[in-house]
Amino acid sequence: MRRVVVTGLGAVTPLAVGVRQTWRRLLDGHCGIKSIKDRSPQFAALPSQVAGVVPIGSRENGGWTAKEWLQPGDERKMALFAQYAMASAEEALNDAGWSPESPEDLEATGVYIGSGIGSLDDVVDTTLAYEKGGYRKVSPLFVPRLLINLAAGHISMRYGFKGPNHAATTACTTGVHAIGDAARMVAFGDADVMVSGGAESCIHPLAIAGFARARSLATDWNESPHEASRPFDRTRAGFVIGEGAGVVVLEELEHAKARGANIYAEVKGYGLSSDAHHMTAPREDGEGPFLAMKRALKNAGIKPAAVDYVNAHATSTVLGDAAENRAIKTLLLGEDGKRHAQEINVSSTKGAVGHLLGAAGAVEAIFTVLAIQEGVLPPTLNLTQPGDPPEEFDCNYVPQTAQQHQVEVALSNSFGFGGTNASICLAKYEK
């Protein structure tokens, strides 16, 4: 089996547009969650009025201005989630130094970008226009803007990549599924290079209303948005919706070495599972996350005791955080009793960016890669009292402040509605 490494990173997040500014702000303890109640009366009428919003501003200052990232006509053709994916792909490809021109290289490069929901704005706006004005009020670009695979399609068309052109849509597991699947395409020889990740932009009253009706969202911190996302904290009471994108360049090891590429980390393993339990709620015993992580390590050929860090899915929900915590401890403590819970390093970066849904797993995989490269654990914001009950939440959750720690092996988890789970094992590259 061919070895797969990460050679490029790109991101659009509520902390900043761009990987480096996002990462620095994350380590410095900044939060990208803001009040959205002033956007419209519809937002103000919702029980949850906070969201992780991509900052508007110049590219130079880490803000989003579409025209700085897109070509003429792209805004009309692309939904916002696809625009975020395009910007992230551009950054990742530039970071990787990969700009192929030969037919052979273009044919060996593919794209795999997913989204959990896609463009809800287009669905709502077009439905209202159709109800009011009929057939002629429907844009000929409605369906292309709507389709989730068009993020990958647009990236392939811009750069002329003729390898696999694929998309996943598996709710909040999408980002990890996209990267894990793409890594396997490289490993099995379907491509030498894959541009992969997830993108999302559905901060819309209808989306928030739906999640709120499902009692999934934080509703008690509308006046203090920065405190709303509280992974592993005993006062956690729901997730905060967010938007953005994360894209990585995955490359076959010998291909990367031959061109002198910078190697951030190696993709060592990938595990998937199903809760087979409930549409939205996890199993309390955490069996699904446990199986995904166990399979990722088995695929990697790595023992649980070797894991230095877990970037948790932990969205700040009561049941979800508890189930994942139980799964992590069950796997990493093992049966020999030689490891103590306090030695398990776990953090959830959703305290800083919220839950980016289909983009979450990709952005968090990027954070995990950087944790490996720089030897630092990103913090879990708003974590003051782990629990509940506190005796079960006794790992090192990196509360509030980043910690220096050598990371050789890490897991990054994502789980989604429908009981779909995935975990990716990333490791320091060893020649």
Image: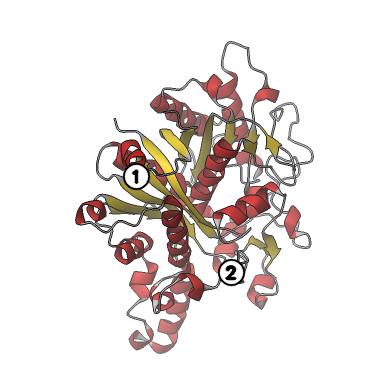
Report whether residue 302 is seen: yes
Crowd rating for badge 2 (residues with CA inside 10 Å; few <14, some 14–19, many 20+): some
Residue drawn at x 64%, y 61% is 51
Q: What residue type is disc 2 on?
A: Pro
Of all residues, the one furthest to the left in this rendering is 103
Residue drawn at x 62%, y 32% is 325
Residue drawn at x 52%, y 41% is 369
Q: Residue 225: horizontal and vertical position, in percent? A: 73, 59
Identify the residue under disc 1. Answer: 259
Identify the residue under disc 2. Answer: 205
Q: CA distance from mark 1 to mark 2?
A: 47 Å
Q: Residue 416: horizontal and vertical position, in percent? A: 49, 46
N-terminal of the pair, mark 1 or mark 2, is 2
Q: Which circle, 1 or 2, is nearer the viewer?
A: 1
Report whether residue 216 is seen: no
**Considering only vertical position in the picture, is 82 above or below 131?**
above
Q: Say which quarter of the image contains residue 301.
A: top left
Q: What scheme was used to colour the molecule?
A: secondary structure
**Considering only vertical position in the picture, is 85 above or below 426?**
below
Q: Residue 274: horizontal and vertical position, in percent? A: 43, 36
Q: Secondary structure at mark 1?
A: loop
Pick the residue in front: 237 or 198.
198
The total of numbered circles placed on residues is 2
Q: Say which quarter of the image contains residue 393.
A: top right
Pick the residue in front: 50 or 404.
404
Please give left or right for residue 22 compared with residue 289 in the image: right
**Considering only vertical position in the picture, is 217 above or below 182?**
below
Residue 412: mark: none
Q: Secondary structure at mark 2?
A: helix
